[in-house]
Amino acid sequence: MGTLLGCIADDFTGATDLAGLLARSGVKVSLRMGVPSEEPTDATTFEVIALKCRTAPFDEALPEVRAAYDWLKRAGATHFFWKYCSTFDSTAKGNIGPIAEALMEEIGTDQTIYCPAFPENGRSIFMGNLFVGEQPIAESPMKDHPLTPMRDSNLMRLLEPQVTKPVGLANRLCVAKGPEAIKARLEELRKDGVAHVVIDAVANEDLYLIAEACQDMPLLTGGSAIAMPLPDLYLQQGVLSADEAKTQVPDLAKTAIVLSGSCSAKTRAQVAAYSEAAPSYRLDPLDLDENGPEKALEWLAAQDLAKAPLIYASAEPDQVRIAQEKLGTMQAGAIVEDALAKLAVAARDQGAERFIVAGGETSGAVTKALDVTTLDVSAEISPGVPWSFCNTGGKTIALTLKSGNFGDVRFFDDALRKLEEIEGQ
């Protein structure tokens, strides 16, 4: 069987999030870090291509997206999924809407849906407004995101300036009536020329109703959770076999490193909890700019990797703002990413075989530095965050890439414990 569903994700943690949810089906999921250079001769049923285009200028992001689409099409994909963050964060001009519209043109379809809801992680949509827990997203910590601050909670208002065709809504009252009502609403909006439809979802049950209604659409867009029901639906249709290959678990040394570049409130709490017991080292962007990562590399070289040390740049919003004011927003982030990438390589060469990485930009920098191109996705640590296995520097490692806002406060400990459970099965 060729590729059934081809997925394009706008960052690396988002891609692992999506791959982990698809892997719940037990079917092997391949995650490609960037557009593959080789032809898709080894493509699996579910293929996810991770790009780094969330905040890139559209004219830089579009060629990569088109190249990913072309590769997936050659792999045999007939259905496509454009994955962005469940917080719907992007720049004022995109890239969520413009890329969706470009993919619609490539595929030849006149309508798609937008559903970034992820109820298991507290993301819900009601009457077109996105919530984090009980807070509208514009009142949540996401309002202070250093690159994509969320100052509006209404998805239609956020999407309209990004696209050239009309935007509409299928609200919770419609969704609650079931798949046929959702299909009818989409058809009604199509007749009115509405190409971009935001769909409410406040619980997992809503996701299953939406997925059942929309599973035959050539293009779906959203957070990872809306794709979660698709494997079960494909199994019911008989287009997917329960006998598909599954990911094999390698034998790994119990040596680990935790690297965190995310400054989200959730990751800051995770860093604080983990550093209570684990060896930890904080990176300062201003010091890195002046002296480079040598002190951090020296600290790492002196660590026992069996104790899974933590190196982090996570900081409070005021600290981030000071660094950005002195170095520039992009430069401050680039300095940290470069340092964490060098530290990842050093940890690998020092013998680390279990890598926990927090933050989308950090994940992109680390996987690039490790020259990781393909991951076999395994079991989830928490909703949307799986372990995966890959090759780097001539050896196999376990790698998890965590979105800044995901996971419980003890996530880093939970991740290490979960990997041992996987190995013991």
Image (cartoon, grey):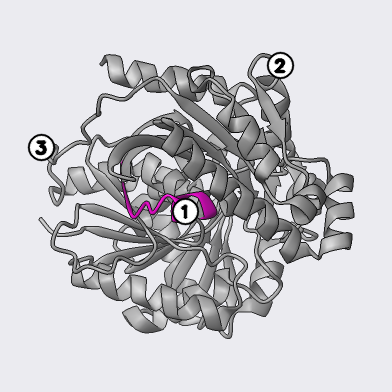
Going from N to C along the chain, the mark reached first, 1 or 3, is 3
User: What residue is pinned by disc 3?
Assistant: 243
User: What residue is pinned by disc 1?
Assistant: 369
Residue type, mark 2 in image: Glu
Q: Disc 3 versus disc 2: distance between alpha carbons?
A: 44 Å
Q: Element at badge 2? A: loop
Residue type, mark 1 in image: Ala
Residue name at image x 33 percent, y 66 percent: 217
Residue 309 x/y as whole percent: 58, 25
Check the picture and name the quadrant holding the C terminus. top left
Q: Quadrant of residue 162?
A: bottom right
> Who is closer to the viewer here, 39 or 327?
327
Q: In this view, does 159 lie to the left or right of 107?
A: right
Residue 65 x/y as whole percent: 42, 73
Tag nearer the camera, 1 or 2? 1
Q: Is residue 159 left or right of residue 373?
A: right
Whether 404 is drawn above or below 414: the answer is: below
Residue name at image x 35 percent, y 76 percent: 67
> Who is closer to the viewer here, 214 or 3?
3
